[in-house]
Amino acid sequence: MSEAAAPAPAGTGAVRFVSGLGLATLLLLAGIMLAFSVGRFPVSLADLGLALWSRLVGQPSGLAPAAEAVIFNIRGPRVIAAILCGAALAVAGAAFQGLFRNPLVSPDILGASSGAALGAVIGIYFSLGIFGIQSLAFAGGLLAVALVYLIGSAVRSGDAVLVLVLTGVVIGSLLGAGVGLMKYLADPYNQLPAMTFWLLGSLSGTDRSDLLPLFGPVLAGTLVLFALRWRMNVMSLPEEEARSLGLATGRLRIAIVAAATLVTAASVAAAGVIGWVGLIVPHLARFIVGPDFGRLIPTAAIMGGGYLLLIDTLARSAAQVEIPLGILTAVIGTPFFIWLLVNARKSWT
Amino acid sequence: MTLAAERLSFGYPGRTIGRDVSLIVKPGEAVALLGPNGGGKTTLLKTMLGLLSLHDGQVLLEGRPLSAMSVAERARLIGYVPQAHAGAFAFAVRDVVLMGRTAHQGLFAGASAADRAVAETMLAELGVGHLAGQPYTQISGGERQLVLIARALAQEPRYVVLDEPTASLDFGNQGKVMRRIKDLTGRGLGVLFTTHDPNQALRHADRVALLGSGRLLIDGVPGEVLIEERLKALYGADVETVQGADCRQRAFLPV
């Protein structure tokens, strides 16, 4: 039809956005229903609604105490944590991809994950409690990126962005060596399995007390990124162009890196190292709603949340034992990414 | 009220490329910067835009030193049109032009209705309004160059600086884009562009400046400045002049 060749009408982008966001939200809701209904103690949608309603109005729900415990203390917190972590990684991935003008960048490009990993294995090595381990992981992620940024800014030769990426790679591998050293020194019967398990990513130990330290930073960082959405579009242009359009790129880059690192570190501290989500979900979101960050950030957040929730549901139900999240995201992510490369290339290059 | 380089030394950190260059761009006039590869044209352009820090001398924008202005202030006065590139992400053409409004917006603000109207107007005026909804990555090189000019105009600047605006364009598009650039002077804008083609300077510029080995050799009316001997010396190559039958038009050919 000749209509197909005609230029897109003005509203097309908005229609794509609303339908993309709506679809992602529906999938997320379906994922939540599925997550509650799968497991050794299935919770139906009706029971979930009843329990939430009774909490809201302060009346007893009439459900078995075990069902309430599953909803509010076990599965509920885990579902929320999965959504928050997935959303965080996807938003951070989108931000870093824009900042580095490269769709193949993931949230650990500046060492956030490797820093958090080192913090966590140090915590495990010194037999700290779960809170200590998570705090060290969070601090490790922030410190690693701060270090990368300081070194990168001190090197005053060539392209600032390229220097930053290279510094991130170098520091990341140094931190990786640190993780290796801690594993080598660790007690092989007790600590080493804990480290290995943590490094592969899991939400199995999540309870209600984990939610606030996760929710706070993720919300704060995401809000900052969303507030800067329009500037982030311009930041995805070559440095000189962004400056000639009136952006103080140096300060803005620090703000974006800080916000994206905050959400990444919080997620890694809560769930361990989970790759692929921050790489694939922004791609998929961009494929659906386009590269404009005002649309990309909310869509990526909802899709990332739904995606990791689905992965986590699979992780705890597919086998007798929990499957580490990092392994599942890789197994699902690799073929998916190849499919994207083959089929969707035109949309972002 | 001008964009002026005064006894400017410029280059990269630790490496001076050009010295003692004085050049003035007035509103309503198109100045072509002509010179061989490596002569410092692009470096001079970027220094006059404030993208590179100058080594000596000064750049004055409407009488004020460029170095005393914020990047946003500069962007409201000078629009920059880089060489057209594909870009990493498939922004809609409309959104690319809207980015020209950045310096007119607050830190957290998005595009206002007025910003959108300016962007649509500029797209229409450059004859690429029909591309507004298409991905910037999927339009042709000539169209991209026009979109980037529209983006610079959306800044509502007083000067527009273009880096080899026709470098990667086909024969027909070169003329089309150059005519659009010439039109900018009709709006009272001062235009500064670099080019590899003396004929372009001859035909479309009000003034031409020759830059060789980092020095400004001569600056004046194209019809007087551009003669065979000067071009031979500037490029270190043989040049042939082709005269029109009525002796009013001429063009140069590299031999």
Image (spheres, coloured by chain):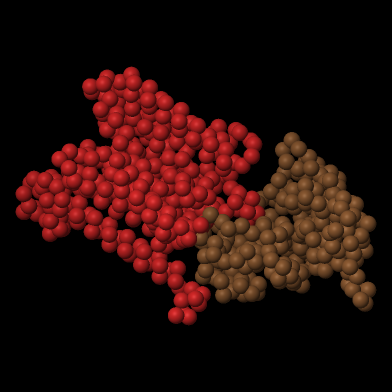
Q: Quadrant of residue A321?
A: top left
The residue located at (26%, 24%) in the rendering is A191
Residue at the bottom extreme of this rendering? A2
Residue at the front extreme of this rendering? B255
The answer to whether residue A323 is above or below residue A54 is: above
Q: Residue B160: where, in percent of width, then height? A: 72, 61
The residue located at (89%, 68%) in the rendering is B242
Name the image quarter holding the C terminus of chain B: bottom right
Q: Nearer the viewer, residue A87 or B204?
A: B204
The residue located at (30%, 45%) in the rendering is A331
User: Going by the image, does B155 lie left or right of B111?
Assistant: right
Q: Quadrant of residue A131?
A: top left
Q: Nearer the viewer, residue A20 or A318?
A: A318
Name the image quarter holding the N terminus of chain B: bottom right
The residue located at (44%, 80%) in the rendering is A1
The chain drawn brown is chain what? B
User: Going by the image, does A241 lie left or right of B12?
Assistant: left
Q: Residue B42: where, in percent of width, then height? A: 74, 51
| Colour of chain A in the image | red
Q: Which of A255 and B229 is in front in this view?
A: B229
Q: Residue B50: where, in percent of width, then height? A: 71, 49
